[in-house]
């Protein structure tokens, strides 16, 4: 990845954002396997062409600094921290990963994350849960009795004022969430990750534009909606999945309120593609969205 510095930030900040990581053939990390094949493969193919500006990498630097501090702590006799592990797949590929902390006394893998408050408010933990299940499965492959995953999230935008006044707002800047994984779940993950690697092997033979499109969930796609609102109001009175339903509701609302109403079309958007995907310049779907 090429790191640019359009704001002319000090050299230590640039160095903190710079990585000398190189992708190894037939080896994919846990975090890479959480992505769709298109994003994972394009990122590797164009690693030397992808650009990022250090001014947009503040939270990545923050996360790295947080991990560096926690690495310096002393683990107990039953704990392992910041260990690099691998698991060989049936098709000759390798799954790799680095977990933050594992406690053999409880069989718990802990991962530290910097996150936003909305992650807690919406209970949006599916990606982190899958990552922890990956580590649990890998630890099982090398003889550990791992069976639980736990996220310790540092909420970088936490507000004390909102914590005092809003009922569903997290009370503290730290938030802990965890899951117990059954033997069946862990075994099922092994089958699922093997299938993912077979798909990766197939897709590596395809040209860029023929790679399978990322799913709506992977693109952070919002659904298409039609909003009904009274003229002059900024906030919609109601949202509909179909235009016909919205226009039928306009007639009812105008009769009840005595005010003119309007229908606003809100097209679906792929937020990750537009704002957060590094390989968008090399993806025909991403380029079409920009156009």
Image (spheres, rainbow, N blue to C red):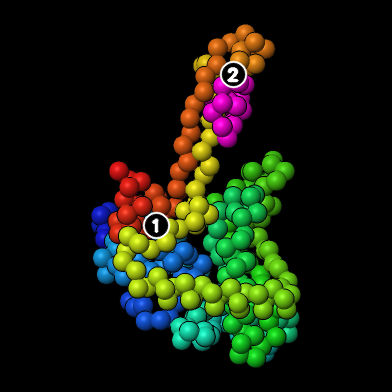
Closer to the eye: label 1 or 2: 2
Q: Position of residue 139 (x, y in %)?
A: 61, 84
Could you tell me if residue 68 is visible in this image? no
x 53%, y 42%: residue = 223
Please tell me which residue is depicted at 48% across the width and 33% down the height of the picture. Answer: 266
191 relative to 60, above or below: below
Q: Secondary structure at mark 2?
A: helix
Q: Give the left or right position of residue 262, taking residue 274 as reference.
A: right
Say left or right for 211 vs 164: left
Verify whether residue 248 appears in magenta.
Answer: yes
Question: Residue 127 appears at what percent x and percent y?
Answer: 57, 63
Q: Is residue 33 above or below residue 249?
A: below
- Estimate the x, y position of residue 276 in percent, counting from the top left: 41, 54
Q: Where on the picture, by quarter, is residue 237?
A: top right
Looking at the rendered image, the quarter that the N terminus falls into is bottom left
**Residue depicted at 53% across the width and 54% down the height:** 217
The Cα atoms of the two marked residues, 1 and 2, are separated by: 38 Å
Question: Upstream in the sequence, badge 1 or badge 2?
Answer: 2
- At x 42%, y 73%, the residue is 202
According to the image, label 2 marks what residue? 250
Along the viewing direction, whichever of 212 and 83 lies nearer the viewer: 212
- Residue denoted by label 1: 277
The answer to whether marks 1 and 2 mark residues whose Cβ atoms lie closer than 8 Å is: no
Q: Which mark is residue 184?
A: none
Quarter holding residue 206: bottom left
**Residue 240 forms part of the magenta stretch:** yes
Check the image and report above or below for 153 versus 256.
Answer: below
Q: Which residues are magenta?
A: 234-249
């Amino acid at each position: 990845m090429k790191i640019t510095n359009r704001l002319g930030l000090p050299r230590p900040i640039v160095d903190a954002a710079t990585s000398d990581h190189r992708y190894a053939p037939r080896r994919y990390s846990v975090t890479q396997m959480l992505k769709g094949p298109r994003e994972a493969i394009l990122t590797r193919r164009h690693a030397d062409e992808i650009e990022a500006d250090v001014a947009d990498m503040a939270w990545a630097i923050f996360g790295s600094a947080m991990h560096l501090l926690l690495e310096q702590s002393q683990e107990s006799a039953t704990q392992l921290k910041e260990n690099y592990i691998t698991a060989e797949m049936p098709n000759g590929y390798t799954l790799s990963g680095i977990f933050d902390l594992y406690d053999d006394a409880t069989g718990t893998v802990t991962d530290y994350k910097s996150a936003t408050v909305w992650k807690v408010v919406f209970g949006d933990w599916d990606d982190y849960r899958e990552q922890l299940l990956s580590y649990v499965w890998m630890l099982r492959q090398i003889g550990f009795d791992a069976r639980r995953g736990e996220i310790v999230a540092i909420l970088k935008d936490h507000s004390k004022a909102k914590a005092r006044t809003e009922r569903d707002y997290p009370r503290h800047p730290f938030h802990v969430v965890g899951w117990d994984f059954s033997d069946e779940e862990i075994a099922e993950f092994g089958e699922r990750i093997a299938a993912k690697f077979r798909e990766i092997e197939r897709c590596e033979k395809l040209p860029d534009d023929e790679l399978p499109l990322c799913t709506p969930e992977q693109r952070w796609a919002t659904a298409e909606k039609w909003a009904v609102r009274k003229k002059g109001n900024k906030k919609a009175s109601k949202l509909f999945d179909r235009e016909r339903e919205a226009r039928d509701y306009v007639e009812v609302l105008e009769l009840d309120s005595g005010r003119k109403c309007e229908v606003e079309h809100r097209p679906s958007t792929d937020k990750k593609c537009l704002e957060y995907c590094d390989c968008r310049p090399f993806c025909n779907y991403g380029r079409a969205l920009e156009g």
